[in-house]
Image: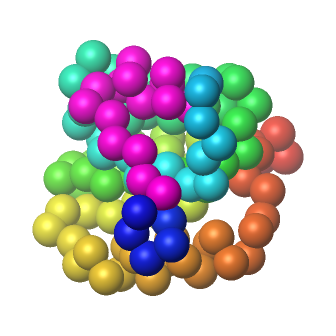
Amino acid sequence: MVSGYKIHQASNGLEALKILESEEVDCILLDMKIPRMNGLEILKQIRDNKLSIPVFMMTAFREQELIDEAGKLGVVNYFTKPFNIFDIRNEVVKVLEQGQDYSVEDR
């Protein structure tokens, strides 16, 4: 537990999806480059499964096409490395406190 939050860590995309099947998750920090599936593939699976979990994407890539695709899939925010971990923490806390629905059906 970190500051009142339970954290799950996945070493690859398939493991991340298994966690989502078995655990209740309030938000996801997702790296674009992760073994066995990239971040966009994982995000597509999350949305295909109708999960309305807020997702934050982290990446070393500044490609507008990736940012646009992630936005279409309902990513809450997109952090480019190197990033300030406190900025991510503050954004996550803000989003969790708001308690919004992050489904992409209306997009």
Residue 9's spot in the image, x, y percent? 34, 42
Residue at left offset 76%, top offset 68%: 99
Which residue is located at x 38 percent, y 23 percent? 15
From the viewer's perspective, is 77 left or right of 21? left
Could you say which is closer to the camera, residue 33 or residue 98?
Answer: 98
Q: Quadrant of the N terminus?
A: bottom left
| Residue 10 in the image: above or below residue 12 | below
Is 41 on the left-hand or right-hand side of 33? right
Residue 8 coordinates in the image, percent (x, y): 41, 45
- Count of labels shown? 0
Q: Give, as a single range, the part of the protein colored magenta.
A: 6-20
Q: In the image as oriented, which residue stretches furthest toward the right?
A: 106
Q: Is residue 38 visible?
A: no
Q: Is residue 11 magenta?
A: yes
Residue lying at 43% horizontally and 76% vertically, measured from the top left: 3
Residue 9 highlighted magenta (yes or no): yes
Q: Can residue 7 be seen from the camera position used here?
A: yes
Picture residue at 33% right of the left edge, 64% below the top: 79
Q: Position of residue 62 (x, y in %)?
A: 24, 55
In the displayed structure, would residue 67 be above or below residue 79? above
- Chosen colour scheme: rainbow
Q: Position of residue 29 (x, y in %)?
A: 42, 53
